[in-house]
Image (cartoon, coloured by chain):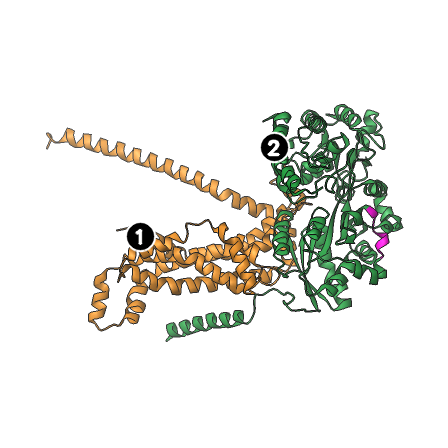
Chain colours: A orange, B green
Amino acid sequence: MSAYAPGTRAAQLGLKIRQKKTTRSSTLIGIGAWIVGLVFVFPVLWMVLTSFHREADAATNPPSFAAPLVLDGYRAFFDSNPWPSLLNSLTASVVSTILVILLAFPAAYALSIRPVKKWSDVLFFFLSTKFMPIVAGLLPLYLFAQKVQLLDNIWMLIAFYTTMNLPIAVWMLRSFLAEVPVEMLEAAEVDGAGLIRSLREVIAPVVMPGLAAAALICFIFSWNELLFARVLTGTVAQTAPVFLTGFVTSQGLFLAKVCAASLVVSLPVLLAGFAAQDKLVQGLSMGAVR
Amino acid sequence: MTRRRTRTTAIAAVAATAVAVSGCAGWGSGASSSADGGAVNVLMVNNPQMMDLQRLTAANFTAKTGIKVNFTALPENDVRDKISQEFSSQAGQYDIATLSNFEIPIYAKAKWVAPMDDYIAKDSAFDQDDILKPMTTSLSSEGKIYGQPFYGESSFLMYRKDVMDAKGITVPPKPTWQQVAEIAAQVDGAQPGMKGICLRGQPGWGQVFAPLSTVVNTFGGTWFTKDWQAQVNAPAFKEAVNFYVNLVRTHGEQGAPQAGFTECLNNLMTGKVAMWYDATSAAGSLEADDSPNKGKFGYVAAPVVKTKSSGWLYSWAWAIQQASPRKDASWKFISWASSKEYEQLVGSQLGWTKVPAGKRASTYENAEYLTVASAFAEPTRDAIASADPLNPGVQPRPAQGIQFVGIPEFPDLGTQVSQDVSAAIAGQTTVDEALDKGQQLAEDVAETYRERGQQ
């Protein structure tokens, strides 16, 4: 026993030192993470604070933290009738996301669970549609929309956002579906389930987090899209980001108004993100864990 | 059961949205593509005067005429891009757009905008003769009028009277640039943190080159000669840019390479500079109720060297797209927005400092306007009246324009050269290097015009 004692004590000491080191390093990592987190969150907090300032206070340099808080920015935003633009953004984002998921899910199935011939070429084709800089398609799309009388029409944006997000969704869903064990499907088939039933009752519940993550990303991309919305819309189909740019002016002050407007326009995305947080984390880590 | 009901409700909601959307092109309102006489679509820059107009239209214009006006307001650079894309393709999506006196002659030559002479002849209440002559000239092409100014501006020198008085300095009513440089040196540091003068240094053909081109003009320089020879590194151009860069580097504002109109406005307003050479329209903001030094500002003519006057001329004006099927309704809106009646409406409802001025002679005879604008009304009118867009310098020009050259290539050329001039203000390059590079760019443009044989 005593022969073992020094060794045990040494081992205990080593364990304590290691524990201390681990505690210290985890504290340091914790502090580091907080600092990095604050650096990333600071601009958003700054935007929130500025949105409650008066224009004159928002424009001061150095900035004033203690300026009185007012609702002028929000009043200016809501007085300028943002509802049609917000509804247009919501329509374009929601409808295009539904279409993307409806089209991407079967495509991803055909590329992973029951792979079609040359599935990797197909997958590469989807990726290749993103090779061209998106701005290169701006003029042809504008002229196309003009010719088919779809300028300033929300359906043009829905079609564009659907095609814009489809390759991303196919790639994402394919990697999620690849995680589904084929045995599960085979078992369902043995039990007499058809394709649709297997998809709905076996695969869908398993890949739901992945589906939610893909849908949320498509929704965010559509909601925030500015370049094409600015070119393709006018008075009828104008979206929220285009409406938002209207507050930036070369004459006079606008910082507080823009911050208030940005905050309101960001809210739907933030809410959707919070609502789908659990599913999103599951979904995004799905492909990473094998 | 509950799950099924939730699913049914969700499907029904999606279907309802799709049906609702399929019936329309969006949630906003707009004039239809056919000749809908009851509505017009307007694409405009989102300057405060335009936003006031947007607020007043429904209750006044639409209530009286029954014509609904759908506005799209965008920042200046965005609106320029969108207008050029809309008008060059003659998409007909918008009936009216705000164009400046830079674009209107170019668009008129391309037949993208409709002439207004017939409408003007039939609409005696509009009173075209009341529009200041240089404005009409700058919005015309080949004898026809293509635009009506909403508001206009020239440039002049603004300064703090109290600072000058404390130093015993009298600013001459028509100063020379040398006098301005001397005064800037004297008042530099007159108050803690106060610099002598604010001059734009921000890159952009409409930023640093707005005031700088007027300095070039009055120093005897020009971008191009009448027969399209580039003159960007010629002695007069160089002397002017050297003078400007030296002045702003020695007695100019903090952060000059990034300072544009807004920054300089803030600087003079808050006492960080004693003088500012810029747009006459800034005076309204300086004398506004919330301006901290309201009533302490003096205004004199744009400084000169070799010319009698040197102020620029700029206007945001209404133009009708040639492809518009609703030209009659469009003219009715323009006639109202640029009328004396609208100025009266703004004066009585929003205050006389907010009147879109600088376009009508009658504005400067209006006692109510003069009560609030007495400090700057006369210098503004004189500055606009003395501006000559056809002959702004000491030599004949190949295209009209004072602070710009009225050719489609100028925004690109001016912006590229301005980036080097701004770098010279920041001390990263020399004026000679900047202008030698600019000369090459200008020569490329000049060559195309020489080849086309345009004079």
Q: Which chain carries label 2?
A: B
- Where residue B241 appears, as percent x and y from the top left, is 69, 29
| Residue in view at x 74 percent, y 59 percent | B56
Determine whether the residue tagged by mark 1 lies in a helix, strand or loop: loop
Q: Can residue B73 be seen in this view?
A: yes
Check the image and report above or below for B18 versus B157.
below
Residue to which mark 2 is pinned: B440
Helix, strand or loop at mark 2: helix
* Residue marked by disc 1: A287
Residue type at mark 1: give it: Gly
Say whether residue A220 is left or right of residue A194.
right
- Residue at the location (67% across, 26% down)? B249
Q: In this view, does A115 lie to the left or right of B349?
A: left
Q: Is residue A24 above or below residue A235?
A: above
On the rendered image, what quadrant is the N terminus of chain B found in? bottom left
Q: What residue type is labelled 2?
A: Gln
Where does the image place residue B434, in percent across and percent down from the top left? 62, 29
